[in-house]
Amino acid sequence: MTQDGHTARVLEVRMATRILITIEGVEFRAELNDSTTARGILELLPMTVRMSRWGDEYYGSIERDFDLEDDARDIMKVGELAYWPQGQALCVFFGPTPASEGSAPVAASAVNPVGKVLDSCSPLKKMGSGVTAEITRV
């Protein structure tokens, strides 16, 4: 109760967690959302992930199994981070993939959105078919 007799309302705020992804020496500021999968990934940090390229998506196994969440989808946005349950992989979307019909990135199958890159993803377009990502909490 407040001093004037009214019941105080508590607003629960879910905070995104800042991370740093370093790929081939280029740093990308990013944040993880508050989903179950993102919280599980956060527990694994710091980690090094060997990633392969599929169109304008990098994906790499984190060898951790998370279930498909209610908000899972396959149509993504440039800069989104996701977890792909079929491959137990972390994904970074930075443009169209072979599954895309337009300019939007499309995952091979449904993925759990776990966050987003805050910086421009354009440097990723110049990188090769395989990269190593160092991911740390900020």
Image (cartoon, rainbow, N blue to C red):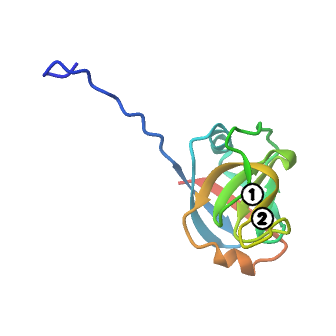
Pointer 1 residue: 91
Can you tell which quarter of the image residue 29 is in? bottom right
Pointer 2 residue: 58
Residue 22, percent across and down? 65, 66
Residue 113, percent across and down? 67, 50
Residue 99 is marked as none
Residue type, label 2: Tyr
Residue contact between numbered discs 2 and 1, judged by CB atoms under 8 Å: yes
In this orientation, which residue lies closer to the viewer: 26 or 80? 80
Residue at the (60%, 67%) spot, across then down: 28
Q: Residue furthest left?
A: 4
Residue at the (77%, 62%) spot, across then down: 106
- Callout 2: few (<14), some (14-19), or many (20+) C-alpha neighbours within 10 Å? many
Can you tell which quarter of the image residue 23 is in? bottom right
Q: Classify residue 126 as left or right of residue 4.
A: right
Instruction: Quarter of the image for the N terminus: give it.
Output: top left
Above/below status of 26 relative to 138: below
Residue 72, percent across and down? 72, 45
Q: Secondary structure at mark 2?
A: strand
Alpha carbon separation for disc pair 2 and 1: 6 Å
Q: Counting residues from the N terminus, which is met first, the one under dot 2 or under dot 1?
A: 2
Residue type, label 1: Cys
Q: Secondary structure at mark 1?
A: strand
Above/below status of 10 relative to 75: above
Count of marks overlaid on the render: 2
